[in-house]
Image (cartoon, rainbow, N blue to C red):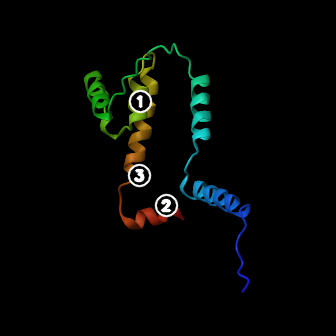
Amino acid sequence: SASYCAGPSILPMARLLAKIMLERRFGMATKEKQKKKKQKKSATTPTHVAAAQPETKETRQALMLKAKERGIKNFRVLNKNELMHILADGITQQEIDALVAGAVARWKSGWGSRKVKNENKS
């Protein structure tokens, strides 16, 4: 009775193929790949990185309070970007009024009866 038996040269190849399939399927990285990644990271990041201070990001609420203190009307309908632009240095009163008018128009367009909205779309 002749039984088929895989020779010793086929077994390592099957193990290698199984390892490759597992790496692709589950994202397993070999030790060599991990070493290469570490080398790339160390090459790209300088050792003497200066500690950068993170910019303080203000919330919309804080920006609205500042706008209220400055006496800007209808500050509640402004979005965060518009508030930051209005509170920036060197902006004229005309630019502020134009931004606020645009925001008020946008806000008002969201109100009205269903019939009016359908007429405006067509």
Q: Secondary structure at mark 3?
A: helix
Please give the label number shown on residue 44: none
The residue under the point 41% across, 22% down is: 93
- What amino acid is labelled 3 in the image? Ser
Q: Is residue 41 above or below residue 30?
A: above
Mark positioned earlier in the residue sequence (1 or 3)? 1
Residue at mark 3: 109
Residue at mark 1: 97
The residue under the point 37% across, 27% down is: 57
CA distance for labels 2 and 1 = 26 Å
Please give the label number shown on residue 120: 2
Expressed as whole percent of the image width and height from the top left, the position of residue 107 reads 38, 47
Q: Secondary structure at mark 1?
A: helix
The residue under the point 40% across, 28% down is: 84
Q: Residues within 10 Å of mark 3 (few under 14, many from 20)?
A: few
Report if residue 23 is visible in the image: yes
Question: Is there a contact, CB below 8 Å, between mark 2 and mark 1?
Answer: no
Q: Residue furthest bottom?
A: 1
Question: Is there a contact, CB below 8 Å, between mark 1 and mark 3?
Answer: no
Q: Is residue 31 left or right of residue 4?
A: left
